[in-house]
Amino acid sequence: MNQQLKRLTTACLMSLALDAAAAKTLPATVAAPSPSVPASLNGLPGISAQTTAIGALAPRAGKSACARPAAGSVIPQPAHIYSSGGALNVHLDYYEDVDANGFPTFCFLDVNGNQAPILHGKPGDTFNIEVTNRVPPVNPTGTTLLGVPDDSLLQAGTPAVAATKTTPAVAGNQCGEQYQFASDPSSVNVHYHGFLVTPRCQSDNVAHTVIAAGDTFEYSFPIPANEPPGLYWFHPHVHGAGEQSVQGGASGQLIIDGIEQFHPEVSGLPERVLVFRDQLVSPNTPAPNPFPNNVVPTWDISLNYVPVAYTSTTSTPSYTPPGVIEMQAGQKEFWRVVNAGADAILDFQVLYDGVPQPVSIVGLDGVPVNVENGQNLVASLLGALLPATSAPVVKTTVALAPGQRAEFVVAPPGPSVKSAVIQTLNYDTGLVGDAVPSRTLATIATQRATTGLPAMPVANPLSLATWTQRFNGLFQAPSTVSRTLYFSEQLSDPANPAAATNFFITVDGATPTVYAPGVAPAITTKVGSVEDWTIQNRALEAHVFHIHQIHYLMEAVNGVALAPADMQLRDDYTLPGWKPPVTTATINGVVTPNTPYDPKTGVLFQNMTATQQTAYLKQYPYPSFTAKFDFRDPTAAGDFVYHCHILAHEDQGMMALIRVLP
């Protein structure tokens, strides 16, 4: 935890210093975009005129670019932007701001000034998304500041490697600026979390794409015709700067329409989108403390940007008032919820008078639940002719690690309910993890008037007859390869307890390596493969496994096969921290707390023989899950990454590259 505080303090000081330096030489924002995509890449349809218009709006004089609602506000809904004629054409500007605590905030704005708009599309649509980076550059004078390399090419708006050099290749190509500029926190790119789109340039290519300060970059990619309907999201993914930008609020939602075809129970319901985000705790509060004495949270939380901030300076916790969700009395709603936080794991419940309410989950991580094993809910007359629709999964607790999404039907509180809230749970992140105490993030009030929410379309079961399902047959598909990967941590200098922590994700048998741009792939596979991966957590704190481009079918947790209702497709999953007995040991003259050991013999785990370690791990096994990883779709060919979606861990090395050969 001390290392985390040190890192946060350094980040804040760096941000303030960078802002101060930029303010002396530049206006508040970059006045106009300098093209990083040469003219040979034609302007996207419906985008070029928007680019001209937004240039005039760029300075946003007198306005806070990333303004946020006040505590206790009615929870607002983001703006919805829908595709038309088979395409979604959108321009987004990326801004930085500073909140009341002096912490950096970040956001994406559309041409109308809407923050974090929801982007809707249909399977088979083309997404054309143009992004202009309006964050001032770190080194406006070409000097080195706080160890950040000189960036003169960036200032000239001239990419070191032109973005037109995108000849398809399995290894991928540099796209936009040189990735050496990733250490510059003014850089950005966009990850389309959950989409199975190509990892080539101008698509979901975070391993090789950087949009430098002042530059405009064009993303253009088709949504596969078999893309599952559901909730996805987008956020920056520049390695080394991901936590700061996402924690600052730079994220938005993506929705592939059509989930009502698989789950007719959502037909016609009001649609509400709820976005959890985390943020740094005010510097005026006590320092965060580790679990289980977690009175002070490591992170503040917001819901649709309405903050629930820790305010106490004593041992008694207190928070700003939660926001308010207004529901129509007697009217069920369809909630689409995402944990868009950088670090905080947020399992939550809907509580009426303290009783957890059952919710009917119809989608997880962008995929309708029970796509293959659901019961047939179509009328018996049509059931013999159509694919079966899916049964919801009923839960009273919804588990959401950073990056996870859940879509469910919830009933409003009845007239006799005195207290209705959304409550996060106290979460044990492990011996060296963050403090995540329980908090009320919203109160729910009912009213007679309609809420003004958009209504879900009415299901047309006949459309399922021609709807291709990407994951058909995955459950029965034989695996071609089995692999074991693991999370682990180690001090960068074992002789210095105050040294920074290195974070690793490693294929069993390989040497743990901190990720850096340009590393060789840790795994090579090919299109058509179906692989069984077991992911272990050998660290003393929780980690969240995420892979780009594909989903995986959950099979077992801690070696125990899951019940059919829990064998769902995911792109994020949380593994709790390993919990062996620990002691404070002196290793090579260094006092080292939280060292695994055998309390019977006093032998440290690291000093045990292989046979002793095997016996020890039977008694204190690593947390693990096993899943089928689906590489059958040729769209996945190329290079992409997998990592811990606690972005502080990813930024500090817990990521690796996979190459999928055609």
Image (cartoon, rainbow, N blue to C red):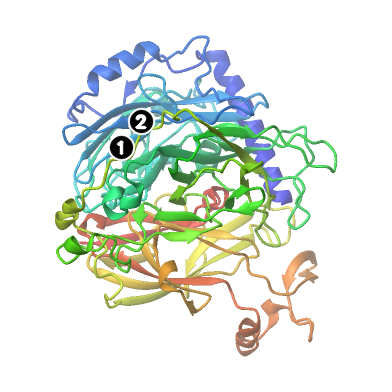
Quadrant containing the C terminus is bottom left
Give the mark, 1 or 2, whose residue is nearer the N terminus. 2
Q: Could you tell whether 241 is left or right of 292 in the image?
A: left
Query: Residue sitting at 66 percent across and 42 percent down?
Result: 419
Q: Which residue lies furthest to the right in this view?
A: 314
Query: Residue sitting at 52 percent across and 66 percent down?
Result: 512
Question: Cβ–Cβ below 8 Å for labels 1 and 2?
Answer: yes
Please identify the quarter of the rendering in which residue 542 is found: bottom right
Q: Residues within 10 Å of mark 1 (few under 14, many from 20)?
A: many
Element marked by disc 1: strand
Q: How crowded is mark 2: few (under 14 residues within 10 Å), some or many (20 or more)?
A: some
Residue 345 visible from this viewpoint: no
Which one is nearer the viewer's eye here, 24 or 283?
283
Mark 1 and mark 2: span between their CA atoms? 7 Å
Rendered location of residue 219, percent (x, y): 28, 36
Rendered location of residue 186, percent (x, y): 48, 30
Q: Could you tell whether 598 is left or right of 533 in the image?
A: right
Q: Which amino acid does label 2 sit on?
A: His
Please identify the quarter of the rendering in which residue 206 is found: top left
Residue 80 numbered mark, or none: 2
The image shows residue 647, relative to residue 441, as above or below, that is below
Residue 438 numbered mark, or none: none
Residue 120 numbered mark, or none: 1
